[in-house]
Amino acid sequence: MDRVFFALGAVLAALGVAAGAFGAHALRGRLAPDLLAVFETGVRYHLIHALALLSVAWATTRWPGRATNIAGWLFLAGTVLFSGSLYALSVSGIRALGAIAPLGGVAFIAGWLTLAWAVWQA
């Protein structure tokens, strides 16, 4: 799983940089400032959790187990749900999409707690 999470983390990081560049260059001036801020929040959490996946890849080599793997999948799910919903909300303007973001936030929190549990139990 270490290679899977490392590859996913690297791809997510690349996509996060691309999303940040897209927001800074293509969306600035096209989106209202509040929607651009929403997009930038999605990018920030996207990049942080790409790094989190890289840390999970390392953690699976040091503290292998089910909990470590679950933490990685939670970070991936959180990125898709949280950042994905914020990206979609900001470019579409459909505010109801913001209701999905808290699910991603819960996945992020659960991922960090699960990773802590995995290390503690190892």
Image (tube, rainbow, N blue to C red):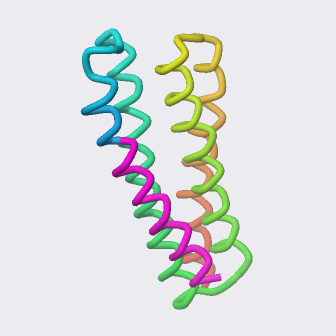
Judge by depth and name the residue closer to the eye, 104 or 27: 27
Height in image: 76 above or below 103? below
Height in image: 51 above or below 39? below
Q: In this view, does 104 lie to the left or right of 41?
A: right
Q: Quadrant of the N terminus?
A: bottom right
| Residue that sits furthest to the front in the current view | 26
| Residue that sits furthest to the bottom in the current view | 61
Q: In this view, does 48 lie to the left or right of 71?
A: left
Which residue is drawn at the image coordinates 29% and 42% (left, top)?
21
Instruction: Specify whether residue 69 is painted magenta.
Output: no
Magenta residues, dominant SS class: helix
Where residue 14 appears, x then y in whole percent? 40, 59
Which residue is drawn at the image coordinates 51% and 38% (left, top)?
83
Which residue is drawn at the image coordinates 33% and 9% (left, top)?
32
What residue range appears in magenta? 1-19
Judge by depth and name the residue closer to the eye, 22 or 57: 22
- Exactly how many numbered labels are in the figure? 0
Q: Is residue 91 left or right of residue 68?
A: left
Q: Quadrant of the C terminus?
A: bottom right
Where residue 118 appears, x then y in whole percent? 61, 74
Instruction: Specify whether residue 2 is painted magenta.
Output: yes
Which residue is drawn at the image coordinates 66% and 35% (left, top)?
103
Where residue 15 appears, x then y in whole percent? 44, 53
Res 28 quadrant in image: top left
Where residue 82 appears, x then y in whole percent? 56, 37
